[in-house]
Image (spheres, rainbow, N blue to C red):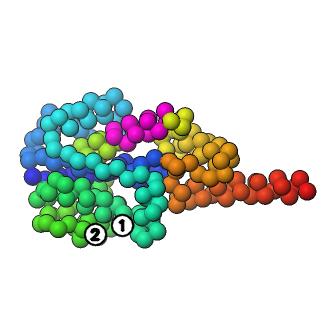
């Protein structure tokens, strides 16, 4: 068996990181499942492909919440966290070969990093843009993206509109600014170790100090 690994939410400031692995036995398994980079698909297309992938192939999903990410970043870089997480889902499937979307500028180095966390024989092949060029990785990306989108939807039901969770999303940043302004701290669904969160918190604290200074 060979497997593909990808993630969704690595760069998000709100919500979880989701890592997925999909395993299959033949390249022809994707002849009838037209997977491609999840970012190029509509939500409806992703949902349809998600159902077809998960009903016919072995897969596993790892969800890492914001608090766990913040805690782990005290002792490791984000790339190290990703390598461990990719190894975790590979270990669940135990394939002979695993294709991973490289999270390092030097792809072979990332592959070696993932391999170092495995306790069984597995050839790890890391490639940049593997989610767009290797179908089994595309499949893993679709699974990760759909699972994360559903989790973001659940968070929106609890907190209100939070956008996609990424720093480039104005709705996400607006939510984060308003929450910090109203509570004096980031929400539990935010990654407090992210520079985006730190900057918004710092500006809010400066604004509060300025208010009291002017009041005097």
Separation of residues labelled 2 and 1 (CA atoms): 8 Å
State the SS at label 1.
Answer: helix
Residue 126 versus residue 67: which sits nearer the camera? 67
- Is residue 133 in view? no
Q: Residues within 10 Å of mark 1 (few under 14, many from 20)?
A: some
* Quadrant of the rendering where the C terminus is positioned: bottom right
Residue located 78% across and 58% down the image: 209
Between discs 2 and 1, the one toward the N terminus = 1
Residue 182 versus residue 45: which sits nearer the camera? 182
Q: Is residue 69 left or right of residue 177?
A: left
Is 183 one of the magenta-colored residues? no
Q: Residue furthest right?
A: 216
State the SS at label 2.
Answer: helix
Residue located 55% across and 34% down the image: 160
Task: Determine which of the numbered discs, if any, sits on residue 113 in the image.
Answer: 2
Q: Which range is magenta?
A: 146-157
Indicate the position of residue 4 as horizontal and vertical percent values.
21, 51
Residue located 76% across and 54% down the image: 207
Q: Hey, which quadrant is residue 154 in on the image?
A: top left
Task: Determine which of the numbered discs, if any, sits on residue 80 in the image.
Answer: 1
Indicate the position of residue 17 as horizontal and vertical percent values.
39, 51
Q: Is residue 172 left or right of residue 32?
A: right
- Is residue 120 in view? yes
Vertical placement of residue 154 versus 185, above or below: above
Indicate the position of residue 31 as horizontal and vertical percent values.
13, 37
The chief SS type of the magenta part is helix
């Amino acid at each position: 068996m060979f497997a593909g690994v990808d993630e969704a939410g690595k760069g998000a400031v709100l919500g979880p990181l989701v890592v997925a692995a999909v395993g299959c036995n033949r390249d022809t398994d994707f002849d009838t499942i037209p997977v491609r980079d999840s970012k190029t698909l509509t939500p409806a297309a992703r949902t349809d492909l998600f159902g077809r992938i998960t009903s016919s192939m072995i897969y596993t999903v790892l969800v890492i919440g914001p608090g766990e990410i913040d805690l782990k970043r005290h002792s490791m870089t984000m790339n190290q966290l990703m390598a461990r997480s990719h190894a975790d889902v590979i270990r669940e499937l135990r394939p002979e070969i695993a294709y991973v979307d490289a999270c390092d500028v030097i792809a072979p180095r990332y592959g070696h990093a993932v391999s170092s966390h495995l306790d069984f024989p597995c050839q790890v092949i890391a490639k940049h843009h593997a989610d767009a060029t290797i179908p089994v990785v595309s499949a893993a990306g679709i699974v990760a993206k759909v699972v994360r989108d559903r989790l973001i939807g659940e968070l929106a039901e609890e907190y209100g509109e939070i956008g996609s969770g990424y720093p480039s999303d104005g709705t996400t940043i607006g939510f984060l600014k308003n929450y910090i302004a109203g509570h004096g701290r980031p929400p539990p669904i935010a990654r407090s170790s992210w520079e985006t969160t730190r900057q918004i918190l710092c500006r809010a604290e400066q604004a509060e100090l300025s208010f009291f200074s002017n009041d005097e």
